[in-house]
Amino acid sequence: MPHREARFGYLLAGLVAYLLLGPLAREIFGEMDGLVLMIALSSILVIGIFSLQESRLLFGAGIILAAVAVLLTVMDFFDAKNQTLKLIALADVFIFFVISIALAVRHLFQEGPITLNRLMGGICIYILLGMCWSIVYMYLIWWHPDSFAGVVLDTPDNPVFWDMIYFSFVTLTTLGYGDITPAEPVARALAYTEAVVGQLYIAILIGTLVGNIAGRIKH
């Protein structure tokens, strides 16, 4: 498959829709919200890998990751007490997010004119960073339930996934409302690391864009 320009708009639209509509899933779908959300998230995986694909092999890998995520979620729906399935499913999604970030970074910071598509790519990277950290926080809660103050123990009836997404983006943007706080050393280290990465990314992104524009003006 020949090289083609990445289309970040599809991935961005999927991520934004998931973040805005996801919290309403429990009210709409009840106990099936986890299954519906994972199917939706898996669809984003396919959209993302399709919009960023550079080879048939990469696209195939994305399809496999999405299929595995759906399969594990279906299995978890019928065996909600099996935390191992949740851990594997989140690991699957995390791998895809990391691949997407790597591909997006390569496209974003390559030479060439600043376009709307590249700006959308920069936003995608920022959102994906927040999603990745939220998954890490979920693993931390399963390993040490008292890692955060202000959240309940993760159970089928009280999932804290959206709490961790909320906390992740509040931390990434250094907003810090204080309703959820890291209570253990590892959680605190992850939180301040995410805050530093978020600010550094914005600084590097702005510097790259300004430098690119300045270079074109000189020429």
Image (spheres, grey):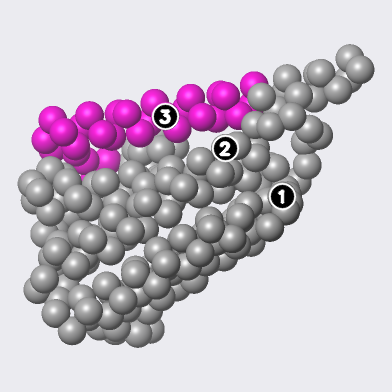
Q: Residue at x 14, y 79 (%)?
A: 79
Identify which amino acid the numbered label 2 is placed on: Val
Relative image position of residue 20 (x, y in whole percent): 48, 64
Residue 123 sits inside the magenta stretch: no
Left or right of 144? Residue 134 is right
Image quarter for residue 181?
top left
- Kindly identify which residue carries mark 3: 197
Q: Residue at x 17, y 46 (%)?
A: 140
- Most foreground residue, 43 or 197: 43
Are the residues at dot 2 and dot 1 in contact (C-beta closer than 8 Å)?
no
Describe the element under mark 1 as helix, strand or loop.
loop
- Kindly identify which residue carries mark 2: 105
User: Of the residues under marks 2 and 3, which one precedes in the sequence?
Assistant: 2
Q: Residue at x 70, y 42 (%)?
A: 118
Identify which amino acid the numbered label 3 is placed on: Val
Q: How far apart are the two marked residues, 2 and 1, measured between alpha carbons?
A: 16 Å
User: Of the residues under marks 2 and 1, which one precedes in the sequence?
Assistant: 1
Left or right of 102? Residue 36 is left
Using the image, determine if residue 88 lies above or below residue 71: above
- Kindly identify which residue carries mark 1: 3
Left or right of 213? Residue 81 is left
Using the image, determine if residue 86 lies above or below residue 208: below
Depth check, mark 2 against mark 1: the one in front is 1
Q: Which residues are magenta?
A: 178-207
Residue 202 sits inside the magenta stretch: yes
Q: How far apart are the two marked residues, 2 and 3, measured between alpha carbons?
A: 14 Å
Describe the element under mark 3 as helix, strand or loop.
helix
Relative image position of residue 134 (x, y in whole percent): 32, 49
Using the image, determine if residue 15 lies above or below residue 67: above
Relative image position of residue 45 (x, y in whole percent): 48, 63
